[in-house]
Amino acid sequence: VTSDALVYSTSLNYNPVPTGNPVVIRTSPAVVPIECHYPRKDNVSSNGVKPTWTPFRSTLSSEEKLPFSLRLMNDDWSAERASTIFQLGDVLHFQAGVNTENHAPLRLFVDSCVATPTPDRSSSPQYAFIDFSGCLVDGQLDDVTSTFISPRPRQDVLQFAVDAFKFAGDSSNLIYITCHLKVSLADQAPDPLNKACSFNKASNLWAPVEGTRDICSCCEMRNCDLTRHSRRLHAPSRWQGGRARRELPSQSDPLVKEADVVVGPLFVHSWQSHLVRRMPSQDAGQLWMVLGLAAVAGLVILILAVLGALTVCRKPSNPV
């Protein structure tokens, strides 16, 4: 809803027949977003319409009070990205964060991230690109650059970049990202259950954003829940100055808060769709311009040919 209009958004989708049957693809279909604007400044016979919807930025699903967030950022990480439309070949820049204003210093981790075609995390198909308590497994695939960004901007912020993808056989070209975020005390050393590990193709090894390299060894084994020392606790609340203050467990009782955060829908389409959408206006104008220049060039060549012929006809004959 804007000051003057009520805006409904939908999308027109086109999906070519895939050649194979993989779980995810990084090649092409198309989505055309459509918006309908209805003026608000008209007489009506009932109260004003106030539609509700799930906001794009993030949806928090947790009983905990820690304000977790997950945002899509611009390529230079300077600001939150306004558009939710991507092309295959683009890079998705995610920034996870938690507000630690009323808590002891915290370090944030992204435990897992799953892409699905609907907001329901259990829907199918699905693709887990971060798994095993902080292993960015998508970075192991060929021709993929997905990675955690190191160093962190702050202990309560974690950034990661993922090459854009979409689901094969899904005509909507939509994906939703559900990430499980959690925190530990900032002075607690990272371990196999609290880590952020990327795969380095140059060295063919896993590397952590912080901590020793051995905490990432379980990423290669695809099983990082070996010790089972992680416990999910509700921290007690204490009243201080008329407001509730949540306190984290002590070092002897480490694990803390966590939450699922959803981002989406994201529209992921192919570059060919831009050609289809631009053809009626910009590309069509460029085509007519090229044809016009070709016609002018042809006319000039014809005139030169006629003048040359006339010159030959007028040339005096040599005496025999």
Image: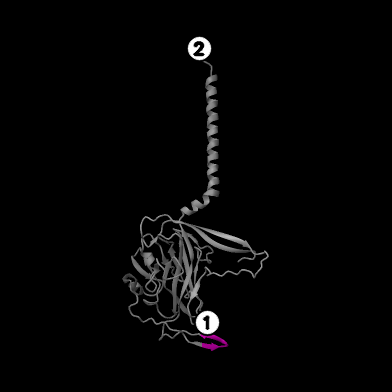
Q: Which quadrant does the N terminus fall into?
A: bottom right
The residues bearing labels 2 and 1 have C-alpha atoms spaced at a distance of 112 Å
Residue 70 pos. (x, y %): 49, 71
* Magenta stretch bounds: 238-245
Crowding at dot 2, Cα within 10 Å, few <14 / some 14-19 / many 20+, comes out as few
Number of labels in the image equals: 2
Secondary structure beneath dot 2 equals: loop
Secondary structure beneath dot 1 equals: loop
Residue 187 pos. (x, y %): 43, 80
Residue lying at the far front in this picture: please name it. Answer: 45
Question: What's the colour scheme?
Answer: one colour
Q: Residue at x 48, y 87 (%)?
A: 236
Residue lying at the far left in this picture: please name it. Answer: 221
> Which residue was labeled with disc 1?
102
Disc 1 marks a residue whose amino acid type is: Asn
Which of 250/221 is in front? 221
Q: Residue at x 33, y 65 (%)?
A: 204
Look at discs 2 and 1 and give the one toward the viewer: 1
Q: Write down the quadrant of residue 162 in the picture.
A: bottom left
Residue 129 pos. (x, y %): 40, 67
Residue 230 pos. (x, y %): 38, 81
Which of 272/311 is in front? 272
Disc 2 marks a residue whose amino acid type is: Pro
> Which residue was labeled with disc 2?
319
Crowding at dot 1, Cα within 10 Å, few <14 / some 14-19 / many 20+, comes out as few
Tag 2 near tag 1, CB within 8 Å:
no
Q: Is residue 4 left or right of residue 86?
A: right
Up/down of 95 relative to 283, above or below: below
Going from N to C along the chain, the mark reached first, 2 or 1, is 1
Q: Residue at x 53, y 46 (%)?
A: 284
